[in-house]
Amino acid sequence: MKIKTLAAGLAAAALCAAQAQTVVKIGYATTATSHYGVGTNAFCEEIDKGSQGRYKCQQFPSGALGGEREMVEAVQLGTLDLVNTSTGPVGNFVPEVKVVDIPFLFRDYEHARKVLDGPIGQDLLTKFPAKGLVALAWTENGFRHMTNNKRAIVKPTDAAGLKMRTMENKVHMEGYRAFGIQPTPMAFPEVFGALQQGTVDGQENPIPVILASKFVQVQKHLSLTGHVYSPALIITSPRLMAKLNEADKKVFYEAAKKAAVAQRRKVNEDEANGIAQLEKDGMSVVKSVDGQSFRDALKPAYASYAKEFGADNIRRIQDFK
Ligand code: EAX
């Protein structure tokens, strides 16, 4: 009799623990050891700790669930709980976000992080719920540089005519056309194969992505153009947030902020060590790009950006201290 009671008690306890635990699915496009993996790990540790184990993550790195646009769509539809994504495709869902994708908008990492964590960036996060999404915090992808297999790029005329994979982002594509590039939008999981087959000549991404994705195996030239700062975000849905009590909502928001700290730290590390590593692995790196010529080439695109986003709004971001 005693054994039966004990077994029943254990079963009840196990059932109670199982019922009390919710697994949330979170996806990202790069590898588990990339800056997105570091940020997502930090997020997952925090929600587990902060919820006393009631919430745990199941991570889907390396684009296992598709590209970033597909994952944002899945969050909106409710088939994925969270995504740690660059803003690349996000402007297709929340148009106001496109302004932060403008080339040469941010001076450096400190400027970008201050804008995004300050009133301008925080106001952009409030635009998500109207589109069936909830942005928990800005994380970080990094300053984007060009790689290709044809030639060293020092100024726009060197990039002209190259078929470059871009994100599915109209603001980027307009800017890259102004450089004379032929932009080919493509989901991230297809990029390595496209470079390997020569479907495109090159692509552009931050050092952390170039490192984690081992683009050195399929790209010869790297030019430190730094032409765009690529923000990132942890995005979930109103559906998931509605299931959380007030305390757990706070846990999720705080966890996303801690993810940003960890992700930005990993970006700093990759920026500090990555270029020497890529050179060691065989990449030919142009370190002194003619940045002014890229900025000059962008003038027609800036006229169009000013029309779309307001010259004052662009200036407010550029001048933010
Ligand atoms: O967010 O698609 C891209 O080039 C992104 O930079 C990559 O997915 C990391």
Image (cartoon, rainbow, N blue to C red):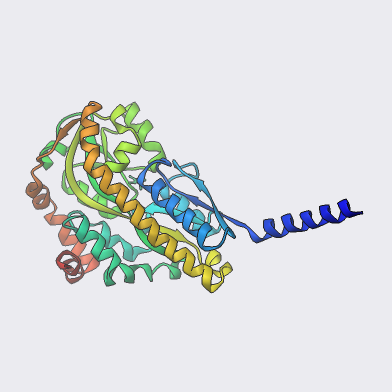
In the displayed structure image, the side of residue 123 where residue 180 appears, left or right: left
Residue 40 at what x, y percent from top left? 43, 51
Q: How many marks?
A: 0
Query: In front: 286, or 306?
Result: 286
Q: Is 115 drawn above or below residue 28 in the view shown?
A: below
For residue 94, say whether it is visible.
yes
Residue 118 at what x, y percent from top left? 27, 69
Q: Given the current orientation, which residue lies at the most extreme front position?
A: 2
- Residue 209 placement: quadrant: top left
In the displayed structure image, the side of residue 216 where residue 93 appears, left or right: right
Q: Which residue corresponds to the image point at 48% horizontal and 54% vertical from the top-left?
A: 45
Q: Is 247 drawn above or below residue 271 in the view shown?
A: below
For residue 133, say whether it is visible.
no
Quarter of the image for the C terminus: give it: bottom left
Query: In front: 314, or 54?
Result: 54
Q: Is 9 drawn above or below residue 249 in the view shown?
A: above
Q: Which residue corresponds to the image point at 33% horizontal and 69% vertical from the top-left?
A: 122
Q: Which residue corresponds to the image point at 92% horizontal and 54% vertical from the top-left?
A: 1
Residue 249 at what x, y percent from top left? 50, 69
Residue 17 at what x, y percent from top left? 68, 58
